Amino acid sequence: MAAKSLHNEKTDALFEVILSLNSIDECYEFFEDLCTIKELTAMVQRYEVAGLLEQGKTFSLITEETGASPATIARVNKCLQYGDGYSKALERAKQSSKDN
């Protein structure tokens, strides 16, 4: 579901840098420099919404728990249905928590 216009050398370079980060602390440092607080908070919220949708939570409960708008929840839900990014990330997070 990724937008084809994002697939380019500059985006690849950013993703390679992200993949090279070695710790949570390095991620905080990088993303605090890269994003505004609002941008980072929005990404965190979307990821949380994806997890709650995967658990079968209702839109109204997700709004109550996260403060996400119905439009945000619907967009994340669409990505879960038609894309692979959230699903892969959530599955890997589940696997990682099982391994620890």
Image: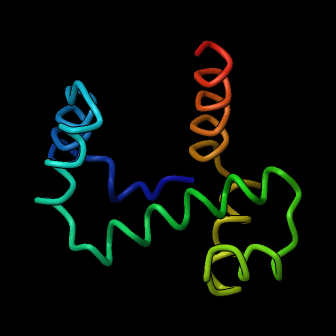
Q: Nearer the viewer, residue 97 or 54?
A: 97
User: Percent from the top left, x then y, of residue 72?
Assistant: 61, 78
Image spot of residue 41 (x, y percent) = 39, 70
Q: Nearer the viewer, residue 22 or 73?
A: 22
Q: Is residue 43 left or right of residue 49?
A: left
Q: Relative to 17, is 59 above or below?
A: below
Image quadrant where residue 96 sits: top right
List the single residue furthest toward the left: 33
Residue reaching furthest to the front: 100
Percent from the top left, x then y, of residue 80? 71, 54
The residue shown at (79%, 51%) is 54
State the image quarter where residue 49 is shown.
Answer: bottom right
**On screen, residue 93 above or below 57:** above
- The picture places residue 44, in percent across and down from the top left corner, at 46, 61
Tell me what residue is drawn at x 21 percent, y 73 percent: 36
Coloring applied to the structure: rainbow
Relative side of 42 to 34, left or right: right
Q: How many marks?
A: 0
Q: Residue at x 61, y 82 (%)?
A: 67
- In the rendered image, the residue lying farthest to the top is 99
Q: In which quadrant of the rendered view does residue 57 lie?
A: bottom right
Q: Quadrant of the C terminus?
A: top right
Q: Residue at x 67, y 41 (%)?
A: 87
Q: Nearer the viewer, residue 28 or 92?
A: 28
